[in-house]
Image (cartoon, rainbow, N blue to C red):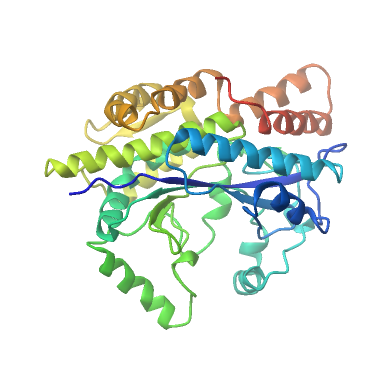
């Protein structure tokens, strides 16, 4: 079996805020997207809300190319937004924005979504990270997608960046999924036996006129409609770029590890979505500071211990794909905290120093602005 190319691409959805107040903008200024496109060759798009902007890398052959693309795109969005007194923040929920104050994008696709999904779509002021990995064989895409579902809670725990909602602590490290899973066709994918089996099921909804194509199936992981890739969608959007790169590295290495097992006529054990969802909830609630179930042992295990097992598991793949440093950076995420951990720390420190709630939330946004453009530590 030929080895897949393991090419990669990333989509990040930023929120745009006013530099002076930290508030989420309500209307995107005309010409902003064009300015970003001029700086970075058009790899930018509108999202559901006017306060969002999406960037996409090119098809990258390795981590060096991926890092360069994301870095230049973040700079381009920052420079273009600065001309309007705004800044992007790479985060999955704004600390104090109100969803009912947001303006929708006028694109026909998004108008259709808000009309069909009503309040469920209107409150989706959330952003995510999508990582594509190129796998040319469509049946292999389906096979690896099925096995990869086991590891999605681990990736989510490393990415959490949405602890606030409408000015309040939620008690969760990732509140984004609590909002997003109100949409239909979300959650873990069904288990399909082949590419044709997947297409057959999707076509039931397409032929009934319910959806246009599989891009309106919003599972945590899915085969891309447009590209020969498996698209991971479960994670929050990390604020620091180096964390995004580490997550992408872990994702592609896990896929390659599963492919290696397949070469030996082995595969990762399959578990019911009922059990996988329990681990996902624990990742939403506790992030890297909690425990996940080790289903093989039937016990809860601290996430940091599970991470060490993952690193050991994928190290041959990290060496093959030249991303050992990126994989090892996942330890740093646990040690210094995810974006959610840092947001909560800034918020409580400001309160302890006498700030009002509004001032403490503004301090969180200031940190997010700085971290979004922070260069990698390497």
In which quadrant will I find the C terminus?
A: top right
Q: Image quarter for residue 359?
A: top right
Q: Image quarter for residue 109?
A: bottom right
- What residue lies at 66% left-to-right and 27% top-to-bottom? 374
**Position of 231 relative to 154 (above/below):** below
Q: Nearer the viewer, residue 197 or 167?
A: 197
Asked if residue 284 lies left or right of residue 254, the reply is: right
Residue occupying the far left of the picture: 265
Q: Nearer the viewer, residue 216 or 315?
A: 315
> Can residue 17 be seen in the rendering of this structure?
no
Q: Nearer the viewer, residue 31 or 107?
A: 31
Task: Where is residue 137? Give x, y as percent.
Answer: 27, 57
Task: Where is residue 297? Give x, y as percent.
Answer: 22, 30
Asked if residue 309 lies left or right of residue 81, the reply is: left
Asked if residue 372 lies left or right of residue 12, the reply is: right
- What residue lies at 56% left-to-right and 35% top-to-bottom? 68
> Can residue 365 be seen in the rendering of this structure?
yes
Task: Where is residue 99? Give x, y as percent.
Answer: 73, 54
**Position of 172 relative to 149 (above/below):** above
- What residue lies at 35% left-to-right and 40% top-to-bottom? 151
Task: Where is residue 153? Give x, y as percent.
Answer: 41, 39
């Amino acid at each position: 079996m030929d080895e897949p190319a393991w090419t990669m691409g990333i989509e990040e959805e930023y929120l745009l805020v006013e530099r002076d107040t930290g508030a989420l903008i309500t209307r995107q200024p005309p010409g902003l997207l064009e300015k970003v496109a001029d700086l970075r060759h058009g790899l930018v798009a509108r999202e559901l809300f006017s306060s969002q902007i999406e960037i996409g890398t090119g098809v990258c052959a390795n981590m060096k190319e991926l890092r360069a693309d994301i870095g230049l795109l973040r700079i381009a969005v920052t420079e273009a937004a600065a001309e309007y007194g705004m800044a992007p923040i790479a985060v999955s929920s704004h600390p104090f924005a109100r969803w009912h104050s947001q303006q929708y994008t006028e694109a026909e696709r998004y108008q259709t979504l808000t009309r069909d999904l009503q309040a469920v779509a209107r409150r989706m002021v959330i952003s995510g990270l999508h990582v594509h990995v190129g796998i040319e064989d469509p049946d292999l895409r389906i096979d690896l997608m099925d096995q990869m579902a086991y590891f999605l809670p681990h990736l989510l725990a490393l990415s959490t960046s949405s602890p606030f909602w409408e000015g309040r602590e939620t008690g969760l490290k990732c509140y984004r999924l609590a909002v997003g899973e109100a949409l239909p066709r979300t959650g873990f994918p069904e288990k399909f036996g082949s590419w044709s089996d997947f297409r057959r099921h999707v076509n039931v909804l397409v032929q009934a006129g319910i959806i246009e194509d599989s891009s309106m199936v919003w599972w945590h992981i899915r085969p891309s409609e447009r590209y020969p890739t498996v698209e991971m969608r479960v994670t929050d959007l990390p604020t620091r770029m180096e964390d995004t790169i580490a997550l992408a590295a872990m994702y592609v290495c896990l896929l390659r590890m599963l492919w290696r097992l397949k070469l030996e006529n082995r595969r990762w054990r399959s578990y019911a979505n009922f059990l996988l969802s329990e681990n996902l909830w624990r990742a939403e609630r506790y992030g890297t500071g909690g425990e996940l179930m080790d289903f093989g042992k039937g016990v809860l295990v601290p996430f940091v211990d599970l991470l060490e097992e993952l690193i050991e598991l994928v190290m041959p793949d990290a060496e093959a794909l030249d991303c050992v440093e990126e994989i090892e950076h996942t330890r740093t995420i646990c040690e210094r905290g995810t974006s959610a951990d840092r947001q909560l720390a800034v918020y409580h420190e400001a309160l302890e120093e006498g700030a009002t709630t509004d001032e403490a939330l503004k301090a969180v946004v200031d940190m997010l602005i700085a971290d979004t453009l922070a260069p990698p530590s390497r």
